[in-house]
Amino acid sequence: MLDIVIIGAGPAGISMAVEARSAGVDPERVLVLEKAPEHSFSLKKFYPENKLVTANYKGFESVCTGVMCMPDLTKSETITYLDRTLRQFAIRVRYEESVHQIFRHEADQRFTVSTEKGDYDTRTVVIATGILGKPNRPAYQLPRTLRNRLLFDVTSVPVENSDVLVVGGGDSASEYVQFLVQRGNRVSLSYRRREFTRMNDINRESLLALARRQKVTLLYDSNIEKVSDAGGRPLVHFAGESPATITYDVVVYALGGSTPDNFLKTIGIKFNGDSPHLREGYETSVPGMFLVGDLSAGPKGGSIIWAFNSANTAMRKILKEYLHLR
Ligand SMILES: Cc1cc2nc3c(=O)[nH]c(=O)nc-3n(C[C@H](O)[C@H](O)[C@H](O)COP(=O)(O)OP(=O)(O)OC[C@H]3O[C@@H](n4cnc5c(N)ncnc54)[C@H](O)[C@@H]3O)c2cc1C
């Protein structure tokens, strides 16, 4: 019997395990299950290589309440910090285990968490699977024939010396543009509004500076109606007269991610409208089952420091109600 099973080894899952260890939970009684072959998989996949990882991302205060904390770092420094912390606190992670079912035994405070490789009995469960595993897609159909040219990140397929359209208006969109320009691409950005109000100051300024130097073409107020296959390249159809259609080599969507509603509902978590119903300490409607990180941050999404702090808050509730270690 474990004390805590944590699902997902991203910033939230790692800090959850660290909080448990710091509170005195035995290393043998904390287990992290990660579906990817490595920890922090979302960061590795979605962050451009030279990205500055900002502590106050999306305007969240960079104030840390728990054990883990970080200043602005590069992508590789951030991953090194998470890596080192996992080793320092002797956190056990089982990789390539994707959780598909969690069963709560009504008779006693106990769950069975099932992966394709085994079943784990535990007193509490913390779900830290984030929202990036399910990137938001546009409303129109994407032609399957263009799979390698319609992308949702900038690391899985190398994009160089190409005509690229980035779609979106948040920080990720700006960071993707900056990265793609540095790689020698000719980049345009399609955004449906006239101003970039969702970006932080650094990303907005960097984007506008690139536009002033004519390194990026900003297509404000542009709505894409559909994308079709023009001889193996994406032909983008815009609403309105000008521009009507443009062919690119690659289109990169930066539209954020969404909560895995079906998975959470299947395991019995109740929702308030579109969001999971959360009580004190990010506990769900299922007693002893918690959501941390991006899953606890609401529709705006979270940040790394939000993930660290949510783990600390959840751990305090777990200690008070379920483990009674102190
Ligand atoms: C392009 C981009 C740039 C960003 N820049 C910043 C920044 O500069 N600063 C900042 O603070 N934040 C930034 N963020 C946001 C930040 O990355 C997230 O808030 C943070 O990663 C959330 O951590 P998490 O642990 O909740 O989720 P994630 O980091 O998404 O980790 C979830 C983990 O769970 C695993 N998993 C998923 N499903 C399962 C399953 N069923 N079973 C087992 N494991 C599973 C995944 O493989 C993953 O490893 C950025 C996000 C993006 C997309």
Image: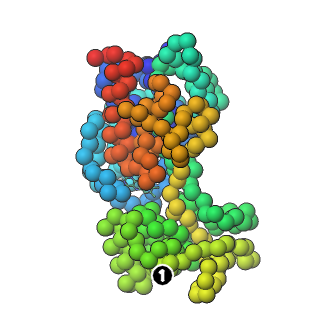
Mark 1 crowdedness (10 Å alpha carbons): few <14, some 14-19, many ≥20: some
Give, as a three-letter code, the residue at label 1: Thr
Q: Secondary structure at mark 1?
A: strand
Q: Nearer the viewer, residue 245 or 45?
A: 245
Q: Which residue is mark 1?
A: 217
Q: Position of residue 240 (x, y in %)?
A: 61, 83
Residue drawn 52% across and 61% down? Answer: 255
Residue drawn 73% across and 77% down? Answer: 230
Residue drawn 51% across and 27% down? Answer: 286
Check the image and report above or below for 220 versus 268.
below
The colour scheme used to paint the residues is rainbow
The furthest residue to the bottom: 242
Q: Is residue 183 among the parts visible in the rendering? A: no
Quadrant where the C terminus is found in the figure: top left
Q: Position of residue 318 (x, y in %)?
A: 38, 24
Q: Nearer the viewer, residue 118 or 113?
A: 113
